[in-house]
Image (cartoon, rainbow, N blue to C red):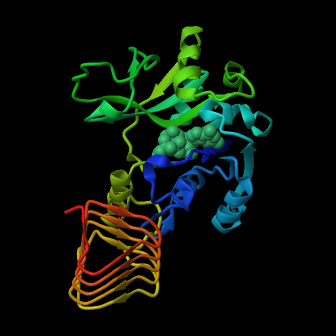
């Protein structure tokens, strides 16, 4: 079986981390994010992976490679303009087999692929959609299911919505080839908002997969940080990740156990780093305080600066005593 990973989004909500870097390769505990997804697919014997990119496939190819270093084979499918999640899948039609696993390129998960595929085969559904239960579904659409686990309805955050928990679309599904017939060619179309609802209203079966598994959408800054911390604290395992990159120079400072330092990071004496992710080649000088923040690559945080609840883009330079987010 092949997998298709959608990596052509702009990643606007993860800026500035994605200003110069594709979302699918932002570092999570010193490993490019996509490595976590590939490891999962490999675990289930899936080694043929199509990467659906948008606009700059050459740049993506250069950054991600041909899969050899991960022991898999990548094929790239590019779009001339953004086609949306549905259009992107349709664009890959010629590369797909009868059944394909599709994943959004921003989901950190240890879902049991075998079990999801089994649910798909047993139910003979056109699509089997992984669902995840969240405590606060306010920023997601809800998915309602019937007694046999069939998907009945998608509800976009209704006004006055007060429910405490609910099942959401986890951004991973098993797709029968016939599902592609529901996707129009050559235009931007969302699989979640347009195609899935039209499959249901046509009377075809869309099955839910509700197995318990770790799930995190890394697409927002706080979730990106959470992913780093979960990996470091062992709440998510699957890749040999590291809290400290190579060639770091660390003075007499206080760095909590969950914070992550990239490669060649310098931390001056008397600095305090808490709940934070510091990316490659950044220098944090003495007396600086960094809390609940992401400091991207090549930044210089000068002496006695304070950065709290902030994400600073690549090559930011803060002059002495600057206070950010305080
Ligand atoms: P935001 O700009 O922050 O919303 O990010 P996004 O567009 O990357 O995220 P979204 O959650 O909307 O997309 C879900 C997945 O589909 C992500 O992995 C995206 O990379 C991917 N995706 C979204 N739009 C497209 C598209 O037009 N083409 C392709 N190939 N992939 C897409």
Which of the two residues, 117 or 128, is positioned nearer the viewer here? Answer: 128
The image shows a total of numbered marks equal to 0
Visible in this render: residue 108?
yes
Relative horizontal placement of residue 158, taking residue 62 as reference (left or right): left
Q: Which quadrant of the structure image shows residue 231?
A: bottom left
Q: Which quadrant of the structure image shows residue 251?
A: bottom left
Residue 59 coordinates in the image, percent (x, y)? 69, 60
Q: Quadrant of ligand 1?
A: top right
- Tell me what residue is drawn at x 70 percent, y 47 percent: 55
Residue 98 coordinates in the image, percent (x, y)? 73, 31
Which of the two residues, 222 or 121, is positioned nearer the viewer here? Answer: 222
Residue 183 coordinates in the image, percent (x, y)? 68, 23
Relative horizontal placement of residue 306, taking residue 267 as reference (left or right): left
Relative horizontal placement of residue 28, taking residue 320 as reference (left or right): right
- Tell me what residue is drawn at x 26 percent, y 87 percent: 286
**Is 324 rendered above or below residue 24?**
below
């Amino acid at each position: 079986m092949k997998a298709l990973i959608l990596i052509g989004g702009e990643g606007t909500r993860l800026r500035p981390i994605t200003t110069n870097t594709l979302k699918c390769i932002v570092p999570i505990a010193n490993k490019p994010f996509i490595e976590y997804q590939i490891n999962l697919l490999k675990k289930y014997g899936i080694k043929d992976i199509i990467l659906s990119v948008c606009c700059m496939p050459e740049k993506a190819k250069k950054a991600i490679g041909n899969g050899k270093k991960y022991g898999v084979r990548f094929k790239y499918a590019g779009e001339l303009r953004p086609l949306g999640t549905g259009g992107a899948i349709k664009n890959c039609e010629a590369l797909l087999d009868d059944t394909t696993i599709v994943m959004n390129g921003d989901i950190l998960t240890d879902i049991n692929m075998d079990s999801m595929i089994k649910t798909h085969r047993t139910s003979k559904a056109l699509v089997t959609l992984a669902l995840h239960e969240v405590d606060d579904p306010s920023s997601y659409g809800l998915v309602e299911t019937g007694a046999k686990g069939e998907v009945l309805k998608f509800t976009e955050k209704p006004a006055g919505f007060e429910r405490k928990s609910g099942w959401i679309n986890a951004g991973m599904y098993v797709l029968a080839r016939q599902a592609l017939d529901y996707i129009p060619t050559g235009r931007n179309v969302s699989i979640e908002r347009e195609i899935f609802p039209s499959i249901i209203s046509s009377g075809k079966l869309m099955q839910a997969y509700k197995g318990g598994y770790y799930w995190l959408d890394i697409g927002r800054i706080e979730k990106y940080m959470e992913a780093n911390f979960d990996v470091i604290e062992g709440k998510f395992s699957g890749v040999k990740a590291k809290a400290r990159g190579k060639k770091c120079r660390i003075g007499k400072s206080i760095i909590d156990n969950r914070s992550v330092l990239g490669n060649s990071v310098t931390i001056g004496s008397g600095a305090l780093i808490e709940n934070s992710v510091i990316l490659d080649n950044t220098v944090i000088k003495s007396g600086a305080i960094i809390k609940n923040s992401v400091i991207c690559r090549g930044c210089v945080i000068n002496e006695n600066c304070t950065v709290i609840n902030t994400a600073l883009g690549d090559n930011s330079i803060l002059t002495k005593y600057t206070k950010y987010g305080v």
